[in-house]
């Protein structure tokens, strides 16, 4: 069995979610290559050592650049804050390493294009972890849309609602600074919502976006006795038109009281409609005009049958899966790609298209009004 020796950079939330996926993937799937958890890279020595011990990383290192120079490393797993992605991905590509990169892809379109160019020039596998594409219910929605079951798409309504900033005491951390996060929920959550819209109903042709700040100052992470200015929006509302002509809206917020991690969409077509909600992620709601009139209504499909993508690798029908399973699905597909199975999606090309929309939305938030987008070929 081919082995892919991985170095991960980042050991917090995404470091844990990715490590779980690398540990689980060969227990439930038969990827064409086996992951080797070789090196965990980071700055915080004791926390890093504990992370490596818990998740089974063979070594720790504080210099990811040095690790990229090693011949016994085949891939890098970038699980760091966004502002570090470009430097790491470009260096990894130049070192000939495959790349598994967390979202948001980058903080600027220029960074995104450099990352894509370097990965394509190096001929390495590049994957961008918009994990929600690998939720079985989302994949069923894509199947139904692609098969024409809802007809011509007229409306896309996307939302990614969280509420963790309702706490005024939450410190001014990296997600609230432009330099490290580029923007607020528009980037962090909107990158997911834009990717899902692109995956299911295509590119954006024109967008307009407004942002709102509810809390302008927060305690400094490094010194809670002092306050600092919040540099990014607390919530954003993006509207626009898809290349196919549908009207679209995407709402992102960290102040949707009671919504803890609610990524959702509704899509309405000439023959039917679909709705999905991460808070009930195994279910897909489907309405078909083709149903007999006396029983027409939104069906509530529990997407846990063996015929549904990825589900057969887990449990019998009805035994639902969770947030972490999409990461395992991505790990399996990434390993197959690294073993020569061809490109894996979404990849850095999708990342560039997502950044194109994000930068247009940021410009609109700052006064550019409606922004037209080039539709990718
Ligand atoms: C934001 O809080 C966040 O961690 C996102 O960054 C992740 O991508 C999402 O899956 C969960 O919420």
Image: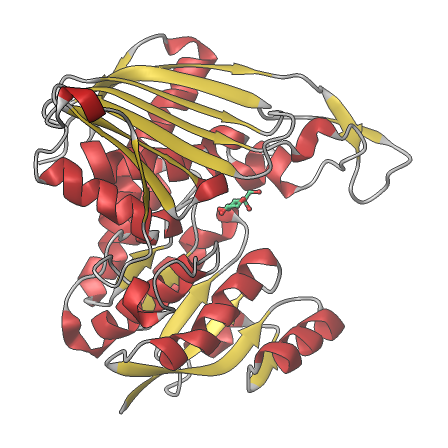
**Residue pictured at 38% horizontal, 69% vertical:** 315
Task: Judge left or right: residue 284 versus residue 68.
Answer: left
Q: Is residue 53 above or below residue 362?
A: below
Q: Position of residue 49 (x, y in %)?
A: 69, 78
Q: Is residue 275 above or below residue 261?
A: above
Query: Is residue 291 at least partly visible in the picture?
Result: yes
**Residue pictured at 43% horizontal, 54% vertical:** 102
The colour scheme is secondary structure
**Residue pictured at 20% horizontal, 42% vertical:** 142
* Viewer-nearest residue: 13 or 260: 260
Q: Position of residue 167 (x, y in %)?
A: 76, 31
**Residue pictured at 36% horizontal, 76% vertical:** 28
Q: Position of residue 251 (x, y in %)?
A: 45, 23
Task: Judge left or right: residue 348 versus residue 186.
Answer: left
Where the N terminus falls, by quadrant? bottom left
Q: Position of residue 235 (x, y in %)?
A: 55, 22
Where the C terminus falls, by quadrant? top left
Q: Quadrant of residue 196?
A: top left
């Amino acid at each position: 069995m081919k082995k892919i020796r991985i170095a991960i950079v980042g050991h917090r939330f995404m470091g844990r979610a990715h490590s779980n996926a690398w540990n689980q993937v060969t227990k439930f799937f038969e990827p064409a290559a086996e992951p080797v958890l070789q090196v965990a890279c980071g700055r915080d020595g004791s926390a890093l050592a504990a992370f490596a011990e818990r998740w089974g990383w063979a070594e720790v290192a504080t210099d990811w650049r040095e690790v990229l120079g090693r011949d016994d490393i085949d891939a890098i797993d970038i699980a760091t804050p966004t502002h570090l992605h470009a430097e790491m991905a470009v260096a990894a590509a130049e070192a000939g390493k495959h790349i598994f990169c967390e979202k948001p892809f980058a903080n600027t379109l220029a960074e995104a294009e450099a990352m894509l160019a370097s990965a394509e020039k190096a001929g390495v596998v590049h994957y961008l972890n918009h994990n929600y594409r690998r939720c079985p219910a989302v994949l069923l929605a894509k199947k139904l849309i692609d098969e024409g079951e809802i007809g011509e798409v007229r409306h896309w309504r996307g939302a990614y609602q969280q509420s963790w900033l309702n706490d005024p005491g939450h410190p001014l951390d990296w997600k609230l600074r432009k330099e490290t996060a580029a923007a607020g929920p528009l980037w962090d959550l909107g990158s997911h919502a834009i990717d899902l819209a692109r995956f299911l109903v295509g590119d954006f042709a024109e967008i307009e976006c407004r942002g709102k700040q509810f809390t302008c100052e927060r305690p400094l992470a490094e010194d809670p006795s002092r306050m600092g200015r919040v540099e990014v929006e607390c919530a954003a509302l993006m509207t626009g038109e898809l290349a196919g002509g549908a009207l679209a809206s995407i709402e992102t917020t960290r102040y949707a009281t009671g919504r803890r991690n609610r990524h959702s969409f509704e899509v309405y077509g000439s023959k039917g409609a679909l709705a999905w909600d991460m808070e009930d992620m195994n279910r897909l709601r489907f309405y078909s005009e083709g149903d007999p009139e006396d029983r027409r209504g939104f069906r509530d499909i529990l997407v846990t049958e063996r015929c549904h993508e990825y589900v057969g690798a887990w449990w019998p029908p009805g035994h639902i899966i969770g947030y972490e399973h999409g990461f395992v699905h991505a790990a399996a597909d990434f390993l197959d790609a690294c073993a020569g199975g061809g490109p894996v999606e979404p990849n850095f090309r999708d990342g560039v298209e997502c950044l194109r929309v994000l930068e247009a939305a940021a410009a609109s938030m700052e006064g550019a009004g409606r922004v037209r987008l080039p539709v990718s070929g």
